[in-house]
Image (cartoon, rainbow, N blue to C red):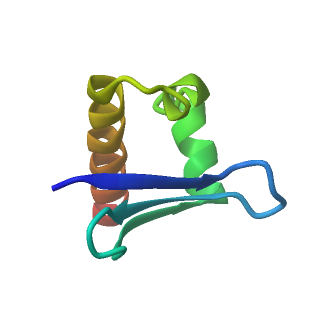
Amino acid sequence: MTYLIDAWLDRPQPYLRILHRETGEVCAVLEADALEELRDHGGLDMSELTSNEPLVLKELVRNLFLFCYARALR
């Protein structure tokens, strides 16, 4: 499976979505509070979002999914 990261971080209500590339289905959503928590814990490096390296992006998507699932379990 391949995913797209749709991130709008420079707006009043920032969000980041992970979309399934083939279907466009939204797989995960991080809104302002979750993004702030993720940044505070060092889990989101803005330079990774602009990377063209497949391994960097794959690891970023994996970490974002794990964060979403961990947050849902709380």
Q: Residue at x 63, y 56 (%)?
A: 33
**Quadrant location of the C terminus in the rendered image:** bottom left
**Relative to 34, 69 lies left or right:** left
Would you identify the image quadrant in which residue 22 lies? Answer: bottom left
**Quadrant location of the N terminus in the rendered image:** bottom left
Would you identify the image quadrant in which residue 32 lies? Answer: bottom right
| Residue 48 coordinates in the image, percent (x, y) | 49, 27
- Given the current orientation, which residue lies at the most extreme left position? 1
**Relative to 48, 73 lies left or right:** left
| Residue 34 coordinates in the image, percent (x, y) | 55, 54
Q: How many marks?
A: 0
Q: Residue at x 81, y 57 (%)?
A: 11
**Relative to 39, 14 lies left or right:** right
| Residue 27 coordinates in the image, percent (x, y) | 32, 68
**Relative to 13, 44 lies left or right:** left
| Residue 40 coordinates in the image, percent (x, y) | 60, 32
